[in-house]
Image (tube, coloured by chain):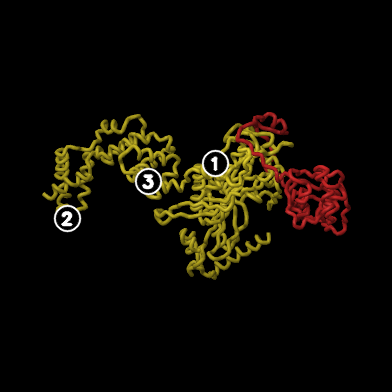
Chain colours: A yellow, B red
Amino acid sequence: MAASILRRCWGSLLAQRCRTGDVPVLHNGQTWRRAQASGSIASGRRAGNSPAGERGVAPWVAVVGLEIHAQISSNSKLFSGSQVQFAAPPNSLVSFFDASLPGTLPALNRRCVEAAVMTGLALNCRINKKSLFDRKHYFYADLPAGYQITQQRLPVAVNGSLSYSLCVGGKKNQMVTRTVRIKQIQLEQDSGKSLHDDTRSQTLIDLNRAGVGLMEVVMEPDMSSGEEAAAAVRELQLILQTLGSSQAIMAEGQLRVDANVSVHHPGEAYGVRTEVKNINSARFLARAIDYEIQRQIKELENGQTVMNETRAFDYKHGCTIPMRDKEGKQDYRFMPEPNLPPLILYDTKSLPANMNHQQVVNIDWIRERLPDLPSVKRVKLVEQYGILPEHSVALLNEDGLMEFFQNVVRQTQMNPKKVIGWILNDMLCYLKQHNLTVKESPVSSLLLADLLNLLERGAISSSAAKQVFEELWKGEGKTPLQIVKEKKLELIQDQQEFEQICQAVMEGHQEEVMEIKKGNRKVLNKLIGLVQRTTRGRADPVLVKQILEKRLSQ
Amino acid sequence: MRKSGGVGGMWALRFSRYIRGAPLGGGSHWAGLSLGSRFTQAASGRSDSRQEAAGDPRQRGLVYQNPTWQHVEQRPLPQKKVTVEVLDHLERLALVDFRDWEGVQRLEKAIQFADQLHAVNTEGVEPMDSVLEDRCLYLREDNITEGTCTEELLRNARETVEEYFIAPPGNIPLPKLEERDTFLQVSE
């Protein structure tokens, strides 16, 4: 409490000093380098609005930390045998324990423990061989017990890290890798859902979600922008999906993000932070955080203070608004969960010989069975196919796209470096336009491979190939070859026919021919284009250029 | 049961690890009946009182035959007055109204009763959270075994709409102290 008041004063002090332009410039320290690396947030605003900006004062630096709740993918709940399923009829998946009827006791789901261990290992955490469960008390209708079972004192995994990549630079063409430390991963229960009926002034309670297993992943405040936070969350999402420990579908609330945001000047103490709660959309994650950063900077530059408060992101208006806090400052009254002894995990060394294997979670066994993580998959893609790192990022970003790419490569003679262009530029573009997933694509990997083979063999030009692709997209069941035949898209193979067409084009455009002969080689491209138009893309541009050059020099 | 937070640690109740220390032998966790004797014994600081009181438990079984009691002096214990702020905080957390000074006095007495535990010398003793803490935590297979009992559950509710429970719109907080018609103000 005292600390928060102190911090608040410090915040307003900072703001005052900014206005008088008295802040010492600090050009060292890690925070400063970070700020530079991330393109110095809001430097534009500072330079424009603040008198201090003119004196070359360091820009504001934002500090972002995340708490992410990931719903564990399991058949049954964390402590009860009721089913986990999204969008089931209300209160149809509730056991007596979930409704906290007297006399019921928790029974821990092994699958949930394994999912947390797996996630911890994938995030380079130290797995605690002994972890503890605690009760966190708060009073709300969707938490009928009046407390949540969580892991406050000794969580299942600690001290990890997550590396993620993002594109930086003016043109977003430079890939950088950053790392955020993982403070801990704790197992805990989800709450039920409340539906607020404002007109009748009542709340409808559905306990289907109450007691579903969650992994809370706590990230250290190592990020400095919404973009970084979004990239880190996206990477975490991919890791969880690869592991299968969570489906991590944000739209279904399986991945929920709370962001702690503050701003300060490099080299100075961190500012007062706010918490932006329940950001449940990948699309809005970066925007919500960036809005909050800008809002705090604006407040401070106007001589206001940032309040230590909880805020919500308003999707409609794209801003954060203060949340009506539940009754002032929280007092969760943590206490050890008396019904659950410590959770003991084993490794191969510590495993007792006569232990019932159904009662054992073996860390080494899980580690040996970890699948390739996205980062490893990307490296392998780059090595195996010679594609660029950013291509590998794009391939993994879309569910099933990597497999699609690999299937196409397997079925075509075309160089993977050329295939990737078709996958990322044409295929992905069409999918996005029609809002389809890779699985729903009307063009199968086999059809695309057929098409690319025609192109590779020189049977069609690349512009003709694009036309074929467009036809394939209609999903009428024709093969690329059929479409080529039907639309007469084959390249003109007859040398004589070719020469005649080129001759005709030259005769029809004497002016251009004169230009070229005078030495303006650029006009040649125009002629090539004209030949292409006449042949409706059926001419091989290399051949056209050769013929034209030959004829022009005659 | 160990932590209280809100009331400045006044509730702090520690089961001493001593309870299941060496004398009790392996495999025993339940010393419920003898709790009283343990605490007083520990408080008295005499290490041999156990033997005098109950004999060697290794010979007589796991549970002490005769509980012993020892009076703890009330005087040296910290006499804590419950402040208005703490009362307000407690009322808010519990969403209950202590109503009158009688209720407050009952609370103070309860705190004093629990505070006797402060007299126990626990130096060098690792706190124990639960008598189950050396037991294995049973792990359940991830099977669906229960949960289809909507009707039974909803029967417990005073009010339902379709298959939903009905609750008031959010918590109904107690009004702020100064806006509240409470005895706490006048008696200050």
- Which residue bears the numbered disc 1? A246
Q: Is the residue at mark 2 from the same chain as the one at mark 3? A: yes
Left or right position of A400 against B153? left
Task: Give the CA separation, mark 1 to mark 3.
Answer: 29 Å
Task: Give the CA separation, mark 2 to mark 3.
Answer: 45 Å
Q: Tell us which disc is closer to us: 1 or 3.
A: 3
Left or right position of A301 against A206? left
Q: Secondary structure at mark 3?
A: helix
Q: Chain of mark 3?
A: A
Q: Chain of mark 1?
A: A
Query: Sequence order check: which comes first, mark 2 or mark 3?
Result: 3
Mark 2 residue type: Gly
- Which residue bears the numbered disc 2? A519
The answer to whether residue A467 is seen in the rendering is: yes
Could you say where residue A390 lies in the image, as x and y percent from the top left? Answer: 40, 49
Q: Secondary structure at mark 1?
A: loop
- Which residue bears the numbered disc 3? A384
Badge 2 crowding class, 10 Å Cα cut-off, few under 14, some 14 to 19, many 20 or more, is few
- Compared with residue A28, is residue A127 higher up or lower down, i.e. above or below? above
Could you say where residue A25 lies in the image, as x and y percent from the top left? Answer: 51, 69
The N terminus of chain A, quarter of image: bottom right
